[in-house]
Image (cartoon, rainbow, N blue to C red):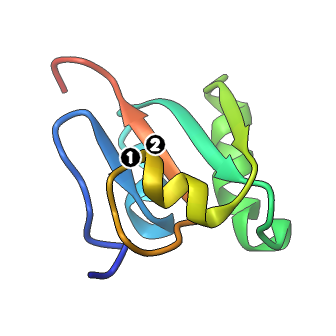
Amino acid sequence: MSNEKVHSNQYVVGLKQTLKALKEHRAESIVIAQDVQIHLLTDVLLKAHTQQVPIEFIDSRRELGNRFGIQVKAMIAAYLKNGL
């Protein structure tokens, strides 16, 4: 299962889905794995900062995947605002 396609009404997992949620102003907060090359997240970090979206860091990509119930590593996820 690709982590780019995992989503629900409460969260999305993966870089593309998180960036899309930020562009649509649907992200309530984001979670980033600490074992990621940060330059891959430049656009996400800029949008999150601009929109004052809280950022939580988690130890590893594997731990982030486990938190969101997927069997693969994930570098980023976003919790979505209610009702959107």
What is the C-alpha distance between the residues marked 2 and 1? 8 Å
Quarter holding residue 17: bottom left
Are circles 2 and 1 on residues that touch, CB within 8 Å?
Answer: yes
Q: Nearer the viewer, residue 84 or 5?
A: 5
Q: Nearer the viewer, residue 45 or 55?
A: 55
Looking at the figure, which quarter contains the C terminus? top left
Quarter holding residue 70: bottom left
| Residue drawn at 18 percent across, 45 percent down | 8
Instruction: Give the total of numbered labels.
Output: 2
Q: Nearer the viewer, mark 2 or mark 1?
A: 2
The image shows residue 57, relative to residue 28, as above or below, that is: below
| Residue drawn at 52 percent across, 67 percent down | 74
**8 displayed left or right of 73:** left
Mark found first going from the N terminus, 2 or 1: 1
Residue at the far top: name it: 82
Q: Where residue 68 sits in the image (x, y, percent)?
A: 38, 49
| Residue drawn at 73 percent across, 34 percent down | 49
Q: Residues within 10 Å of mark 1 (few under 14, many from 20)?
A: many
Q: Where residue 20 sits in the image (x, y, percent)?
A: 39, 56
The residue type indicated by label 2 comes to Ala
Q: Where residue 61 sits in the image (x, y, percent)?
A: 63, 64
**17 displayed left or right of 29:** left
Q: Where residue 28 sits in the image (x, y, percent)?
A: 45, 25
Badge number at residue 12:
none
The image shows residue 2, relative to residue 83, as above or below, that is: below
Badge number at residue 21:
1
The image shows residue 69, relative to residue 51, as above or below, that is: below
The residue type indicated by label 1 comes to Ala
Looking at the figure, which quarter contains the N terminus? bottom left
Tag 2, which secondary structure? strand
Q: Which residue is mark 2?
A: 78
Q: Residues within 10 Å of mark 2 (few under 14, many from 20)?
A: many
